[in-house]
């Protein structure tokens, strides 16, 4: 065997071992913990459920995709160790925190205002409005939540093998699995909400109250985020 062939063989073997090392971190403990974290209602779940209930199934999928994409920067920051900046820099944390709180209050105000104008949107109206805007709101909602970066900074390293030779690969694998679980669970939440939607179509008053209820809930989350500590 010549040197070039030997080098290729060694390279391929290394890649295989690295891939196996990355997949080995997907433990039952990680899957169960991630499932609990994703299922517990938070800002993203509330946004997705309210979208499915008030705007339809397709809009809820757009919201789920947006919320999932919104955690990508936090996962990347955790993998690169940038989340530590938020932990040790009170100023950066406060700036992002207040921006997120203000955005939540803006969404709450928008939802409250829309409750007085329209009780239920049809799929055709939602298409005209644009699923991109629904997804963009989900992205912004999660990007402006600094607690997510601190959470992933504390959460993901727990499942990285201490003697692993490729910690970045392990972090990437864990991040991708967490994102996939987030997307699937959020879509299920949204579709379940859309299933309940048909029972409320003929009750505009109830829909307005529900609209305002979700608006109040988002506002409460905004105030909670504003009072959060690093």
Image (tube, helix red, strand yellow):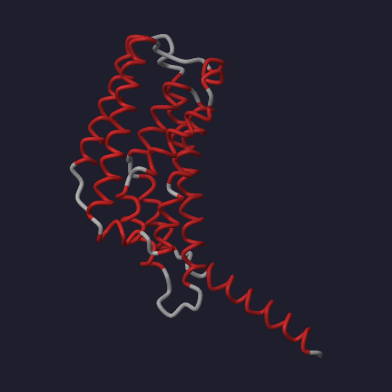
Q: 121 or 205, which lies in front? A: 121
Left or right for 131, reference 42: right
The C terminus: image quadrant: bottom left
Q: Is residue 154 above or below residue 212?
A: below
Q: In this view, does 93 lie above or below 85?
A: above
Where residue 162 appears, as percent x and y from the top left, is: 40, 77
Q: Residue furthest right?
A: 1
Residue positioned 33% across, 40% down in the render? 41
Where residue 95 appears, as percent x and y from the top left, is: 27, 45
Residue positioned 37% across, 9% down in the render? 117
Looking at the rendering, which quadrant does residue 112 occupy?
A: top left
Q: Which residue lies furthest to the front in this view?
A: 91
Where residue 160 appears, as percent x and y from the top left, is: 42, 70
Q: 203 or 45, which lies in front? A: 45
Q: 88 or 204, which lies in front? A: 88
Residue positioned 66% across, 79% down in the render? 13
Looking at the rendering, which quadrant does residue 156 occupy?
A: bottom left
Left or right for 132, reference 202: right
Where residue 224 appears, as percent x and y from the top left, is: 21, 39
Looking at the rendering, which quadrant does residue 29 occupy?
A: bottom left
Q: Is residue 82 above or below residue 122?
A: below
The N terminus: image quadrant: bottom right
Left or right for 4, reference 201: right
Residue positioned 43% across, 48% down in the render? 71
């Amino acid at each position: 065997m010549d040197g070039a062939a030997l080098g290729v063989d060694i390279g391929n073997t290394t890649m295989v071992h690295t891939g196996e090392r990355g997949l080995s971190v997907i433990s039952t403990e990680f899957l169960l913990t991630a499932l609990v974290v994703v299922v517990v209602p938070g800002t993203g779940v509330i946004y997705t459920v309210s979208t499915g209930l008030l705007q339809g199934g397709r809009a809820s999928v757009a919201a789920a995709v947006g919320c999932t994409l919104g955690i990508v920067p936090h996962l990347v920051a955790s993998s690169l160790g940038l989340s530590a900046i938020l932990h040790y820099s009170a100023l950066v944390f406060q700036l992002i925190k207040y921006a997120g709180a203000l955005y939540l209050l803006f969404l709450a105000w928008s939802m409250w205002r829309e409750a007085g104008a329209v009780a239920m949107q049809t799929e055709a109206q939602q298409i005209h409005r644009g699923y991109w805007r629904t997804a963009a709101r989900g992205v912004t909602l999660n990007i402006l939540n600094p607690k997510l970066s601190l959470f992933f900074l504390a959460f993901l390293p727990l499942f990285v093998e201490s003697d692993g030779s490729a910690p970045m690969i392990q972090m990437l694998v864990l991040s991708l699995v967490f994102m996939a679980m987030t997307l699937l669970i959020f879509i299920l939440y949204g579709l379940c909400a859309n299933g309940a939607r048909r029972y409320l179509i003929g009750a505009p008053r109830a829909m307005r109250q529900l609209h305002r209820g979700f608006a109040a809930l988002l506002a409460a989350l905004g105030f909670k985020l504003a009072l959060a500590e690093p």
